[in-house]
Amino acid sequence: MTLTQAALPSRSALTTVLMVLAGSALLGLSAQATVPMLPVPMTLQTLAVSVIGLAYGSRLAAATVLAYLAEGAMGLPVFANGGFGIAALAGPTSGFLWGFVGMAWLTGWMVERGLDRGFVKLFIAALIPALLLFVPGGLVLSMVLGKTAAETMALAVTPFLLGGLVKAALAAMIVAGGWSLLGRR
């Protein structure tokens, strides 16, 4: 069971739509918290995707990220550094953007399979998909920019590993805290 399923056991369609909008807004805001790095900026997006996946479950989390991508494609400045448009969804960092869908889905799927409570389980459910995000992110970056595997590792993987661990831990703490608050109600 996910945190949102426990908190809202009988959701209406309107509640689900509002959750998607809230999650996509969180993701858009997290993209604006950036540390400028080239070609891939460091943002809080992976933290937001992890929290959404841990709290929403697989389908709702993936739908939320797809809504976020659609908002950016339609011209809302929701991508890193206020970016938007179709070009962002086909550029060097597009593997990360599209990979967020899989990351959200897999995180939620892991929660639905029993990694739903307790810091360690939530941390594992957040960390594994976050590490797998480097596969589509690195592959697309390598293809678009014509980089070697070693160059791709140096540009798009190595600088983000420690941050990935920290963000997975933060996501696990946030959702574990949500479960604690819900248990006190």
Image (cartoon, grey):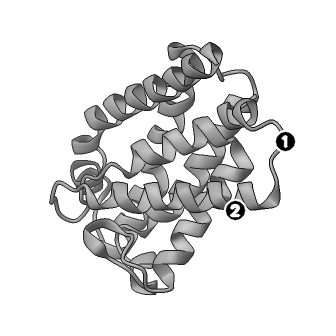
Mark on residue 87?
A: none
The residue at which mark 1 appears reads as 10
For the point 43% across and 86% down, the residue is: 75
Q: Amino acid at mark 2?
A: Val
Viewed as shown, does residue 74 lie left or right of 110?
A: left
Measure the alpha-carbon separation of dots 2 and 1: 14 Å
Q: Nearer the viewer, residue 176 or 153?
A: 176
* Horizontal arrangement in the rendering, residue 149 relative to residue 18 (left or right): left
Closest to the observer: 169 or 23? Answer: 23
Tell me the quarter of the picture where residue 131 sits: top left
Q: Mark 2: few, some, or many residues within 10 Å (few <14, many ≥20)?
A: some
Q: Position of residue 71 (x, y in %)?
A: 51, 76
- The image quadrant where one finds the N terminus is top right
Left/right placement of residue 184 relative to residue 159 reads right
Q: Position of residue 183 (x, y in %)?
A: 64, 15
Q: Position of residue 10 (x, y in %)?
A: 84, 42
**71 relative to 101, above or below:** below
Q: Which residue is mark 2?
A: 17
In this rendering, position of residue 79 left or right of residue 117: left
- Quarter location, residue 77: bottom left
Quadrant in the picture for residue 167? top left
Label 2 or label 1, whichever comes before in sequence order: 1
Residue at 44% x, 32% y: name it: 171
Location of the C terminus by quadrant is: top right
Q: Secondary structure at mark 2?
A: helix
Where residue 122 appears, as percent x and y from the top left, is 55, 23
Please, what secondary structure does the residue beneath circle 1 have? loop
